Image (spheres, grey):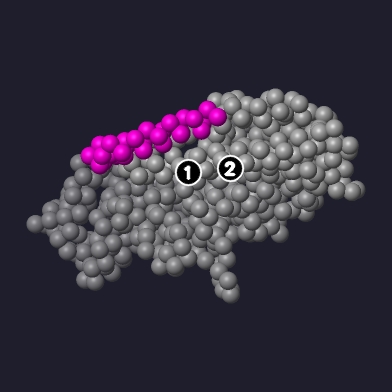
Amino acid sequence: MALHQLHDVIRRCQAIPDDGFKAEDYDQFQMAGRSCLEEGKTAEVLDIVTDENNKEIVKSMGWNLLGPLVKIVLRKEAESLQHCLTTLKHVLEVCSPKELLVGLLEQIEDADVDNIAETIILLLQPLQIALLKLGKKKASSLGMSLSTVLNQISQLPVPYTKEQEEDDVYGLCQCCAALIEFVKPFVDEVDRGRESKAIVAENEQRTELLKFCMKSLGNPVLQSQLDKVPDSAEDPPLRHFATEILVILSCIGESFPALLLHHLVKKKVESGFLEEDVKYPKESLACLSYLLFVQHIGIERFPTVFSPVFILQFNMQYIEVLLKSSEESMLSKGLELYEKSLQRTEDNSLPMQLLEVKCFLRVPQDLVTVMTLCPIQHLRTEALAVFQLCMDKFDTEGKHKLFGCLLKINQHAGVQGYIIKNIKNQIDFSLKPGNSNVWFSGPQLLPLLHLVLSLPEGPETDLLQNFDRIMGSLNLLRYLLIRDKEWDNHTGIWTELYKIEENFLKLLHTGLKMSKAHYEAEIKNMEENRRRGPKESKGVCTLTVGDEKLSNMTPEMHLQVLQSAMFTFDLIESVLARIEEIIEVKVKP
């Protein structure tokens, strides 16, 4: 039936002039052709399409068969596969490239999720053929094609391990390899155009290829694991894809330094069709920086004239972008990029003036966020190591300012305690012979000491929540009183001792008394409830510690938490008593 209808449509159309086909003719041809293919009449359709008498009809209407042909090819049925592939090849040879382009992109865009990779791999070469037939006026069509393909590829899961990358279950790696082959002739055209100083067409095509590279760096490269495989001569597929993207950037005349410095030196207004963020997205440039300075892909094309400090400075904007992400792959790359950028500089070399650049303070705070809130343990550990490396790289004035700023903007007691420990280490170093400096001794140190030796909320400070900070402060004070003799007073601690006693130690005493009284009352109440009998003591209760409610606790668990809190208070009190003993001995006439 369907074959009979197709023959009828062909006979009727043969009597119509080439430019006289109506919309209903296209519809009937498409419907009859689809029905024939679906009914398995693939050999008959091939005969009709390749019949020389039907050449003009197929030239005008053949692209309408792309949809059903692609569906049948993807089924991979042995009896129809070769007929459909031959039909598809003939349609590509005779049909208008513009119409083919529309039809092919429609098939790629409408591909089922399960068939995205197979559809792209099947149609990239036909799409390449259609684009090449467009001649020099193909830049916008190339851009549309690349955007469509990348949008579809972005739906494919990115392999998380090397084993997954090798298995390539979802076909992402195959798509990336096919995509590189797809763009090669267009890259070659731009490369040849640069040599011959051709301007308009090649510039437009170059812009579309730049967009493609930037978008590819954003996804899938940025989401991929890109480390080399030890003892392997070949790069993994996604690392190879990343390498090829950088090769394309070089071939189309893009300078890596110019790209990475773009956001620092860009003009206020850029004319042209492309918006700034589309042409130079920061995430993509962050990926480029990671490839160069961590993976050393393409580093041979990066000039060696830039100093390590300058490289760190322009990388900070990209490190910040990566560290603000919630995705493991981006966080990991941000930490690695920051670590490698810092390692290129010497210890104690970064000047304080760099901290006047906002991102030099924002990025350490981003590290703190990863250290304290990231659910992935190895990233928290890496962030702490990079945090320490960051502090080590600044000179003494820079360290002094960085410590002060971080203490002011940070509310996490554990991080505050860690910073206070670093302050103690710097003071200890400066007190050793030959290491004296003005920033960790004398008047310059005193504002930092007063910042450390204080309670955030006075006697009402939650001592449990701020335990790490308080113990760090007390240990620092005890160290100073023992290490810095009152007749030397290098740090000024003895001059300021009366203020510290009044504004820190006295308030801490008050806070301890209030906290211990509260928890002792809670423990007494619990014990009274237990003595009243088992019936009244059964069930669950809720306890608030550090502004957080701990619910569904048994009375035994509740009591254990209260006793643990009392132990903490005793620990603080013991260190405080030791400090007061030192003061009493030192100041006794």
Whole-percent x, y for residue 439 in the image: 82, 36
Q: Quadrant of the N terminus?
A: bottom left
537 falls in the magenta region: yes
Label 1 vs label 2: CA separation? 11 Å
Residue position marked by numbered label 1 in the rendering: 564
Q: Which segment is the magenta one?
A: 513-541
Q: Is residue 156 above or below residue 237?
A: above
Q: Nearer the viewer, residue 312 or 348?
A: 348
Please name the amino acid that badge 2 sits on: Leu
Which numbered disc, 1 or 2, marks the residue that appears first in the sequence? 1
Count of numbered marks: 2
Please name the amino acid that badge 1 sits on: Ser
The secondary structure that dominates the magenta segment is helix
Secondary-structure class at tag 1: helix
Residue at the (25%, 63%) spot, across then down: 75
Whole-percent x, y for residue 210 in the image: 57, 46
The answer to whether residue 356 of the structure is visible from this angle is no
Q: Is residue 297 above or below residue 103?
A: below
Residue at the (47%, 43%) spot, across then down: 564
Q: Nearer the viewer, residue 518 or 295?
A: 518
Query: Is label 1 in contact with label 2 (beta carbons under 8 Å)?
Result: no
Q: Does 213 sit left or right of 52 as displayed?
A: right
Mark 1 surroundings: few (<14), some (14-19) or many (≥20) residues within 10 A: few
Secondary-structure class at tag 2: helix
Q: Nearer the viewer, residue 41 or 228?
A: 228
Residue position marked by numbered label 2 in the rendering: 571
Q: Quadrant of the C terminus?
A: top right
